[in-house]
Image (tube, rainbow, N blue to C red):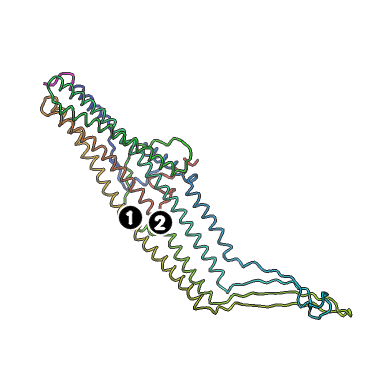
């Protein structure tokens, strides 16, 4: 027989833990998944208070990173510099001003002995062959476009890093809570096993097994304690913080279900991903560079105008001043050794840019298919844990506890049932976090910028900025 007073304590511990366990409800319960993205900010905050607080906190962190992250600030300065290079690209070269003396005889230092001696001032200007200046401006514009898209890609990547770190931190805190909760239950089970062994109603193997499980939980807590500073350091880096400001405490992992259409996601990725658009700009830039290289087969022109002032002669006869106007041009004769290799170089650079774009487009499409499949599978797994595995595991604990009361099952069966509940809770939290991280990767691949990252309501983001 089991001593009276022991099983009520065990029952109280396990049943109270089960009653207080946070079972994450399936997303979309009571509403269709299609209606979720169309909720207003007020309805979203009312129906999902925890999600709303979490998303508002995440929006605040993103706004902080946009202001403080040094990678974003460096990309912003690079963008500003690139835009400043557009106007100078089509500007003419500086005119050349010259002054001097023309046709002065060596035998005399005066300006009135020779008829052709004069004091001269001149101005010259180089004019590129028509079309070159426009092409130079187009090249600088395409370069600025590529850098602009690179700036947007940097923002999206930092946002992805923040979301991943935020989710990892929330998962670590939730796993710590679950381990601590399970450790308390196992400690109560250990006390019961020790009491049974002391009165001869149990065996030493039960005590040792319970001690091993308790020690395992303590080791898990140590591992989680080591992981948390690493995650916090990564989040701090992404935010651009330099001090020891406390980070917000994320809530437990929550399902933020989204309707994913692979066809629409691929279309969005190929048309909106800043990285791909930057490569498209580089392709266009190299096309213009090739045109400019071919323009080098045509000459540029130097226009020079000068004014010569002549003094009166020794007999005081007047000499009129003189004006000169000349046009010069370079002769692009060295084709085989100079112009043709440069044209071949431009052709190779254009083809390289096109191949790079094709390769990156294929990689983005492949990664998007992988992340979409991962999101679909983890979502199904999370729903299965929520609706079947975890409820069944908890019912098994209750049933095993009832059987243990009447001595129909042994202690090891009860212990294994409790560990099954614990492992299922850990798996559920991990699966939900994996699903949300897959959505974060999909946001990066499809080029979603911070102001339209669903399901964050824009009203919440505006309030945070205010």
Magenta stretch bounds:
1-6
* Left or right: where 49 falls relative to 120: left
Residue contact between numbered discs 2 and 1, judged by CB atoms under 8 Å: no
Identify the image quadrant of the N terminus.
Answer: top left
Quarter of the rendering containing residue 419: top left
Image side of residue 309 versus residue 273, left or right: right
Tag in front: 2 or 1: 1
405 and 44: which one is in front? 405
- Which residue is situated farthest in the right direction here? 315
Q: Residue at x 53, y 78 (%)?
A: 334
- What type of secondary structure mainly makes up the magenta span? loop
* Label 2 vs 1, first from the N-terminus: 2
Q: Residues within 10 Å of mark 1 (few under 14, many from 20)?
A: some
Residue 412, position in %: x, y? 15, 31
Residue beneath label 1, please? Answer: 367
Residue 314's disc is none
| Residue at image point 56% right, 58% down | 84
Q: Nearer the viewer, residue 385 or 94?
A: 94
Q: x, y percentage for residue 30?
A: 29, 40
In what element is the residue under mark 2? loop
In the picture shown, does residue 388 fall above or below 211? below
Q: Position of residue 363 (x, y in %)?
A: 34, 58
**How far across and how far down the image is residue 241, in percent?**
47, 41
Judging by the rendered image, the residue that carries numbered circle 2 is 273
Q: Marks 2/1: CA distance?
A: 13 Å
370 and 450: which is toward the camera: 370
Relative to residue 354, is residue 219 depicted above or below? above
Q: Is residue 113 magenta?
A: no
Q: Quadrant of residue 315?
A: bottom right
Helix, strand or loop at label 1? It is helix
Q: Is residue 302 left or right of residue 169?
A: right
């Amino acid at each position: 027989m089991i001593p009276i007073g022991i099983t009520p304590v065990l029952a109280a511990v396990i049943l109270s833990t089960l009653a207080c366990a946070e079972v994450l409800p399936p997303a979309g319960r009571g509403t269709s998944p299609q209606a979720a993205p169309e909720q207003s900010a007020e309805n979203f905050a009312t129906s999902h208070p925890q999600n709303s607080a979490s998303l508002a906190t995440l929006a605040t962190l993103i706004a902080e990173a946009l202001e403080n992250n040094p990678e974003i600030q460096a990309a912003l300065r690079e963008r500003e510099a690139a835009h400043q290079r557009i106007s100078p690209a089509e500007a003419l070269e500086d005119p050349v001003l010259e002054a001097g003396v023309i046709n002065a005889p060596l035998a005399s230092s005066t300006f009135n002995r020779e008829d052709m001696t004069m004091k001269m001032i001149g101005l010259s200007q180089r004019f590129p062959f028509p079309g070159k200046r426009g092409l130079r401006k187009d090249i600088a514009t395409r370069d600025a476009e590529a850098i602009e898209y690179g700036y947007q890609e940097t923002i999206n990547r930092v946002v992805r890093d923040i979301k991943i770190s935020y989710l990892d931190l929330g998962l670590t805190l939730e796993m710590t809570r679950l381990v601590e909760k399970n450790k308390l239950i196992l400690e109560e089970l250990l006390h019961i096993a020790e009491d049974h062994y002391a009165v001869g109603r149990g065996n030493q193997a039960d005590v040792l097994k319970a001690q091993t499980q308790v020690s395992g939980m303590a080791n898990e807590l140590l591992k989680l304690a080591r992981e948390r500073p690493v995650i916090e350091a990564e989040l701090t880096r992404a935010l651009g913080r330099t001090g020891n400001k406390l980070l917000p405490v994320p809530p437990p992992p929550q399902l933020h279900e989204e309707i994913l259409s692979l066809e629409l996601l691929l279309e969005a990725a190929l048309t909106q991903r800043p990285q791909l658009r930057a490569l498209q700009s580089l392709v266009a830039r190299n096309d213009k560079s090739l045109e400019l290289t071919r323009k080098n087969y045509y000459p540029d022109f130097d226009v020079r105008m000068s004014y010569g002032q002549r003094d009166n002669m020794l007999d005081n006869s007047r000499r009129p001043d003189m004006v000169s106007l000349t046009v010069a041009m370079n002769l692009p004769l060295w084709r085989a050794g100079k112009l043709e290799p440069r044209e071949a170089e431009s052709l190779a650079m254009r083809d390289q840019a096109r191949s790079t774009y094709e390769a990156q487009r294929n990689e983005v499409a492949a990664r998007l298919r992988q992340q979409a499949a991962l999101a679909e599978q983890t979502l199904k797994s999370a729903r299965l844990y929520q609706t079947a595995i975890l409820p069944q595991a908890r019912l098994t604990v209750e049933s095993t506890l009832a059987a243990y009361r009447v001595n129909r099952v042994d202690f090891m069966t009860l212990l294994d049932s409790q560990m099954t509940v614990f492992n299922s809770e850990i798996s559920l939290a991990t699966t939900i976090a994996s699903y949300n991280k897959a959505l974060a990767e999909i946001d990066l691949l499809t080029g979603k910028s911070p102001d339209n990252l669903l399901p964050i309501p824009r009203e919440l983001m505006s309030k945070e900025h205010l």
